[in-house]
Image (cartoon, rainbow, N blue to C red):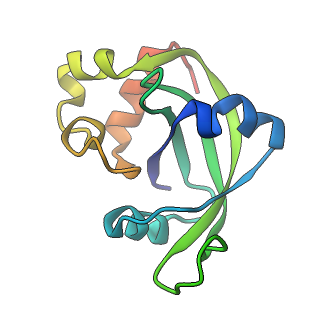
Amino acid sequence: MAYWLVKSEPFVYGWAQFVEEGSTCWSGVRNYTARNNLKSMKKGDELFFYHSNEGMEIVGIARVIKEHYPDPTINDERWVAVDIKPVKKLKRPVSLSLIKADKRLSEMALINNSRLSVQPVSKKEWDVVLKLSGENY
């Protein structure tokens, strides 16, 4: 299993709406690196759901339920989407400032490639973020 992080502005598509809907098509990605990350996702992979711009914190855990397919929001075969579903809200959100302050997370893409909307997370980073959130997941 691989681990990922996806970003969404909470006023555009937040965790609460995601939970209410029960699943979503993660579409609209127009960056080649982020697109390649979507293509690398496998069913069952887990993701952190990050509120960007407003909040700037990891708020929940999601899971890939359908691997990449053509993005339905554009008629261009270069772009793909995946389907994801919420798994659980974190006990405590993990803020970007807390992530930046933790030396164990110094190589995390969220810090080093902050504009990337879909990014890999190492198993070590995954475990550290879960500890910071108070989760025993």
Residue shown at 29% from the left, 16% from the top = 97
Along the viewing direction, whichever of 30 and 108 lies nearer the viewer: 30
User: Percent from the top left, x then y, of residue 59?
Assistant: 55, 25
User: Percent from the top left, x then y, of residue 76?
Assistant: 53, 84
Quadrant (top left/top right/bottom left/bottom right) for the C terminus? top right
User: Percent from the top left, x then y, of residue 26?
Assistant: 61, 57
Q: Is residue 12 shown left or right of residue 37?
A: right
Residue 19 vertical placement versus 121 (above, below): above
Residue 18, quarter of the rendered image: top right
Looking at the image, the residue that sits furthest to the bottom is 77
Residue 126 vertical placement versus 93 (above, below): below
Residue shown at 65% from the left, 25% from the top = 89
Whether residue 61 is visible here, answered yes or no, is no
Q: Is residue 3 shown left or right of residue 44?
A: left
Whether residue 127 is visible here, answered yes or no, is yes
Residue 61, quarter of the rendered image: top right
Along the viewing direction, whichever of 63 and 12 lies nearer the viewer: 12
Along the viewing direction, whichever of 110 and 64 lies nearer the viewer: 110
Residue shown at 40% from the left, 25% from the top = 129
Residue shown at 55% from the left, 19% from the top = 135
Q: Is residue 99 shown left or right of residue 126?
A: left
User: Percent from the top left, x then y, of residue 12?
Assistant: 61, 39
Along the viewing direction, whichever of 53 and 92 lies nearer the viewer: 53
